Amino acid sequence: MKKILYDTYDKKLISKLPKAVFEGRIFVIVSPHETRRAVDFLLSKPILGIDTETRPSFKKGKQNLVSLLQVASREECFLFRLNLTGITSDIVRLLEDETVPKVGLSLHDDICSLSRRKTFKPGTFFDLQDHFSELGVKDLSLQKLYANVFGEKISKTQQLSNWEADVLSDKQKLYAATDAWACIKLYDEYVRLKETGEFELHIVEETPFPDVP
C-alpha cells in the first residue's frame, strides 16, 4: 500500500496526532574535556541526526549565540551545551567529518549559527528539506514534515525556553533529543520512498477567499 504524502499540511491537524518522542539514552555534555569521548562514540555510528537550539532574544536587533548542539544516533543523543563547552577541536572534528552523514533540516541556518561561535569547513551534511521538496512536499518544517510522513506530532512547547539555564529540564532534554532523532527517522523513510516509489503525492487545493461585494 502506497504512503500518501501531501504537498501542504494543515497545522491545525497536528494537535490531534499521537506524540512522537525519543526513547533512547540522552547524555548532556557540559565540559570541554567530555567532548572527545562523545565525538568518538558518535562517529562510530552509521548516521547522525543534528539540530541546534539558541536562547531566544526578546530584544529587537539582539541575537544570542547558539546554546546547544544536539547530535543523535538511532539509540542515543548527546546534547553539547555550547554556552559551557564552546566549540572544541573535537566538536570541529565532528562537524568537519566526511565519513558519517549528518542529517537535519534547514542546515544552512544551523551551520551559520555554529560558525558564529567558531569557523569550520562543513563535512557531509544531508538537508531533508532539499530532498523532500524533490518529492513535491512544500511544507518542510520539522513538525509539519514529520506529521505528513508519519502521522505523529512533535511537540514544540520547549522551543522558546531558556537554553542557557544552569540545568536543562527533562522536558528540554527530551525536546532537543527528539528533534535530532526525528531527522534520522525522516531520512530512513525518505530513502525507502525514493528507492521503492511507494508513495503518492496529493495536492491540497487552497480554499479561495470569498468574493467581497
Image: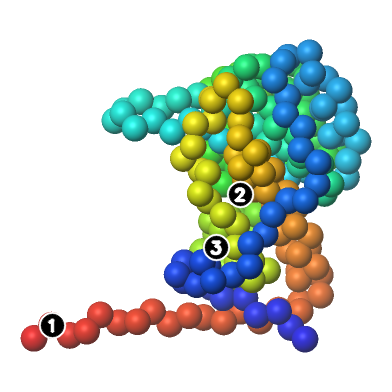
Residue 36 or residue 137, whichever sits in front: 36
Q: How far across and how far down the image is residue 177, in percent?
A: 69, 43
Q: Are marks 2 and 3 in contact (CB under 8 Å)?
A: no
Choose mark 2 or mark 3, whichever is in front.
Answer: 3
Q: Residues within 10 Å of mark 2 (few under 14, many from 20)?
A: many
Q: How far across and how far down the image is residue 13, in percent?
A: 50, 72
Mark 3, secondary structure of its residue: helix
Disc 2 designates what residue? 105
Q: Quadrant of residue 82?
A: top right
Mark 1, secondary structure of its residue: loop
Q: Kindly identify the residue that appears in the image at 78 percent across and 21 percent down.
A: 35
Mark 2, secondary structure of its residue: loop
Q: Quadrant of residue 192?
A: bottom right
* Disc 2/disc 3 C-alpha distance (Å): 12 Å
Outermost residue to the right: 44
Q: Quick one: label 2 or label 3, which is nearer the N terminus? A: 2
- Mark number, residue 144: 3
Image quarter where the N terminus lies is bottom right
Disc 1 designates what residue? 212
Choose mark 1 or mark 3, whichever is in front.
Answer: 3
- Mark number, residue 127: none
Q: Kindly identify the residue that appears in the image at 68 percent across and 48 percent down.
A: 178
Q: Amino acid at mark 1?
A: Val
Q: How far across and how far down the image is residue 66, in percent?
A: 54, 28
Outermost residue to the left: 213
The answer to whether 46 is drawn above or below residue 137 in the figure is above
Picture mark count: 3
Q: Quick one: label 1 or label 3, which is nearer the N terminus? A: 3
Q: Amino acid at mark 3?
A: Lys
